[in-house]
Amino acid sequence: MVDGNRLIEQAQKGDRRAVAALYDEYQALVYRYIAYRIGDPSLAEDLTADVFVSMVRNLGQYEHRGRPFLAWLYVIAGNSCKMYYRRQKLAEFEPLPEEMIDHEPNPEDVTHLRLTHERLMAAMPRLTDNQRQVILLKFIEGLNNSEVAAILERTEGAVRVLQHRALAALRQALVEEEQHEPA
């Protein structure tokens, strides 16, 4: 990882190479975050580009204040996703396209993984937007509670509560789905 603070300071002074280095460092992470929220790879690319345009426009307003730069980018990305849904008047969580599913070489494992993935994706719309964000940031992005709290601008305790409620809602949805499956 690059020296983020020095790079950010250089970018804020107009250094194009520093801006490009920030893009190179964080683009894949922002894209993955958006892709999991939106579910459409080409739209995720477009929204990721929008995030970095917004980053360049607002870089002068960024202040470290103990929050990582990536958390600031995730907030911008989250707002971009919300704006997309508002524009589309679409508040559902779309399933990931087949090409985004990571395939294992073992067919049995792939089948099990795909069924689990489908069940989880079908259950995700039952969560609130904040619960979905906690699940994505914790379990897909691998962030810890303090990083998630910084991104969502909540306390770590609130993140734990959101995570607990989200997992309980997912568990309930999966149990209900099992009860409705034909024998």
Image (cartoon, rainbow, N blue to C red):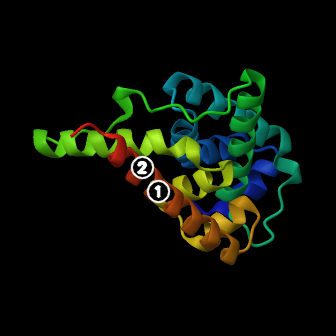
Does the residue at mark 2 contact the one at mark 1 (Cβ under 8 Å)? yes
Residue 92, position in %: x, y?
61, 33
| Count of numbered tags | 2
Identified by mark 1, the residue type is: Gln
Foreground of the two, 58 or 141? 141
Q: Nearer the viewer, residue 162 or 8?
A: 162
Q: Residue at x 50, y 62 (%)?
A: 167
Picture residue at 65% right of the left edge, 30% below the top: 47
> Which residue does the numbered mark 1 point to in the structure image?
172
For the C terminus, the quadrant is top left
User: In the rendered view, does 112 fall on the left or right side of 158?
Assistant: left
Q: Amino acid at mark 2?
A: Glu
Query: Residue tagged by mark 2?
Result: 176
* Picture quadrant of residue 111: top left
Decide if residue 87 is on the left or right side of residue 107. right
Compared to residue 134, the image places residue 107 above or below, namely above
